[in-house]
Image (cartoon, helix red, strand yellow):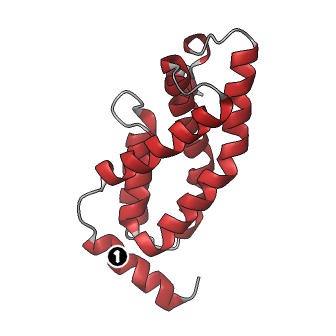
């Protein structure tokens, strides 16, 4: 990333306003309902909970890689890393919509397209997971992520 791009990212982070959680929530909800519709689980509340939980897991794992860019901002990096860890560590308070909104507010022109691309890439594994749980009897709640164990690892 050339220095002017880093300067623009730094300035965007410095001037960031409140996170657009409601906008991110609409994007995440629409995405999840499309996944459930395409897998035949549209009316299944357990499927929605599982898909949301699994999407959050995918986000926590894959989006952590984006910190490679943020590491090039040594003044901002520790604060940003701390904010992300707080979001990632508390699934009861911060769902996938909060993770989306957090990245969006760093620099929308950079992270909105990245997130859209990641959601496209996550679609097939998410659909496959929903389909697999349906074939195995549909016990979605029994297959939620054990976030306490995950956080301890």
Q: How many marks do you count on the picture? A: 1
Q: Quadrant of the C terminus?
A: top right
Measuring 66% from the left and 46% from the top, which residue is drawn there? 122
Residue 76 pos. (x, y %): 38, 67
Position of 146 relative to 63 (above/below): above
Measuring 60% from the left and 38% from the top, which residue is drawn there? 35
Residue 45 pos. (x, y %): 48, 19
Position of 1 relative to 73 (above/below): below
Residue labelled with disc 1: 12
Residue 58, quarter of picture: top right
Q: Quadrant of the N terminus?
A: bottom right
- Taking the view exactly as shown, the residue that stands out farthest to the bottom is 4
SS at mark 1? helix
Measuring 38% from the left and 47% from the top, which residue is drawn there? 26
- Pick the residue in front: 53 or 80: 53
Measuring 64% from the left and 27% from the top, which residue is drawn there? 40
Q: Residues within 10 Å of mark 1 (few under 14, many from 20)?
A: some
- Pick the residue in front: 76 or 26: 26
Position of 24 relative to 50 (above/below): below
Visible in this render: residue 78?
Answer: no
Position of 138 relative to 48 (above/below): above
Visible in this render: residue 20?
Answer: yes
Residue 116 pos. (x, y %): 56, 60
Residue 82 pos. (x, y %): 39, 50
């Amino acid at each position: 990333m050339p220095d002017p791009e880093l300067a623009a990212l730094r300035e965007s982070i410095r001037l960031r306003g409140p996170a657009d959680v409601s906008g991110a929530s609409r994007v995440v909800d629409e995405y999840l309902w499309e996944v459930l519709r395409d897998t035949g689980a549209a009316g299944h509340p357990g499927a929605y909970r599982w898909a949301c939980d699994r999407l959050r897991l995918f986000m926590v794992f894959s989006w952590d890689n984006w910190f490679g860019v943020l590491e090039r901002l040594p003044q901002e990096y520790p604060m940003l890393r701390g904010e992300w860890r707080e979001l990632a560590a508390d699934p009861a308070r911060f769902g996938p919509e909060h993770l989306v909104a957090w990245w969006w507010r760093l620099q929308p022109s950079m992270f909105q397209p990245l997130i859209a691309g990641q959601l496209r890439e996550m679609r097939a594994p998410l659909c496959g997971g929903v389909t697999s749980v349906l074939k195995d009897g549909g016990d979605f709640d029994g297959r939620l992520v054990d976030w306490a164990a995950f956080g301890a690892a």
